[in-house]
Amino acid sequence: MFGVKKKKQPPIRSLVGEGMVVDGNLCFNEGLRVDGEVNGDVTAADDAAHSIVVISENARVHGKVKASHVIINGEVHGPVHCSEFLELQPKARVTGDIRYEMLEMHAGAVLGGELKPLRQADKPALKLAASKEVREA
């Protein structure tokens, strides 16, 4: 819309079903949905530059979560690293530090950790709308 092209999300091909408990690390390509419990890290494969993980309302992850697009509506006890877009839905409960490129946080989400953007700058550069001048904030 209005000339902005959205990237097509990768398909979700893997599922940790409700009632299922996985003890160990999960490495996935493209997309993963967690409806159960994972006691270990949940990470996209190194060659999965565009990946998505969905942690649903009743899901729990005790470990690191790493993908390019992360949607959380359940519990995560561990760090979260998101290289593109992180969505924290209303029932999200995260205990751990979060690194993100872009963040959308819904009312009701609870965080127990530090939010850090991947592009860390002491003073962000501001581009003035009326000119091409860039100033330090």
Image: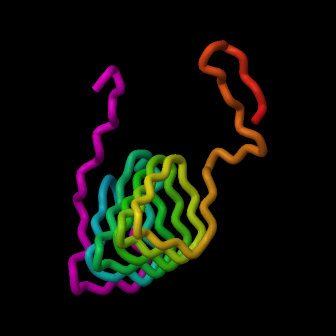
Which part of the image, by quadrant, shows the N terminus?
top left
Instruction: Give the answer, above or below, for where 32 lies relative to 64.
Output: above
User: In the image as oriented, which residue stretches furthest toward the top?
Assistant: 131
The quarter of the displayed image where residue 134 is located: top right
Across and down, in percent, residue 50 comes to 39, 46
Dominant secondary structure of the magenta stretch? loop
User: Does the magenta-highlighted stretch encompass residue 17?
Assistant: yes
The quarter of the displayed image where residue 106 is located: bottom left
Q: What stretch is highlighted in magenta?
A: 1-26
Q: In this view, does 14 lie to the left or right of 111?
A: left
User: Does the magenta-highlighted stretch encompass residue 127?
Assistant: no
Across and down, in percent, residue 53 comes to 35, 61
Q: Residue at x 75, y 36 (%)?
A: 137
Instruction: Give the answer, above or below, for where 17 lies relative to 54.
Output: below
Instruction: Give the answer, above or below, for where 84 lies relative to 110.
Output: above
Q: Which residue is drawn at 40% across and 52% down?
A: 69
Across and down, in percent, residue 32 comes to 30, 63
Q: Which residue is drawn at 71% across and 38% down?
A: 124
